[in-house]
Image (cartoon, helix red, strand yellow):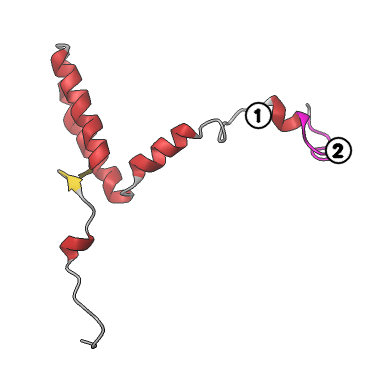
Amino acid sequence: MNRRSSRVHTSLNRNRTIMGVEQRAFMVVAFAASAMFANGVYLGLIFIPFLHLFMQWLTKKEYNFFNIFMQYLNESDAYGSIPRPSDWQKRPVGWGRGLPW
């Protein structure tokens, strides 16, 4: 070990999860389960373990998936699949020549 290095334990570098799911995503699963239970939709509770497993898989793939998804929802107008009139009405002269609009 070098003089200027120190040990960093893996427990200090791990992301905080609840049952293997990112914290805010776990709250979504818990809210869905409690809403189904409170409203008497007991058959819908069958899908909660599958939702939890899906959230675990997403957390393993990308820990910040919930933050990324929420940012996408906030900026959904910037990533729309349908072109807006402002996209083609304000373009420079000669740009997009031959397009149907």
Image spot of residue 79 (x, y percent): 55, 35
Q: Are marks 2 and 1 in contact (CB under 8 Å)?
A: no
Q: Amino acid at mark 2?
A: Val
Q: Is residue 8 above or below residue 67?
A: below
Reading the image, the residue beneath label 2 is 93
Marker disc for residue 83: 1
**Which numbered mark, 2 or 1, is in the foreground of this view?**
2
Q: Locate residue 11 relative to residue 83 in the image: left or right.
A: left
Q: Is residue 47 visible?
A: no
Residue 86 location, quadrant: top right
- What span is colored magenta in the figure? 89-99
Local packing at callout 1 (Cα closer than 10 Å; few below 14, some 14-19, many 20+) is few
Q: Quadrant of the C terminus?
A: top right
Q: Is residue 7 above or below residue 45?
A: below
Residue in view at x 20 percent, y 86 percent: 1
* Residue 98 located within the stretch drawn in magenta: yes
Q: Secondary structure at mark 2?
A: loop
Q: Amino acid at mark 1?
A: Pro
Q: Locate residue 51 relative to residue 38 in the image: left or right.
A: right
* Residue 93 located within the stretch drawn in magenta: yes
Residue 90 location, quadrant: top right
CA separation in Å, label 2 and label 1: 18 Å
Task: Identify the mark nearer the N-term, 2 or 1.
Answer: 1
Residue in view at x 40 percent, y 36 percent: 70
Image spot of residue 12 (x, y percent): 19, 62
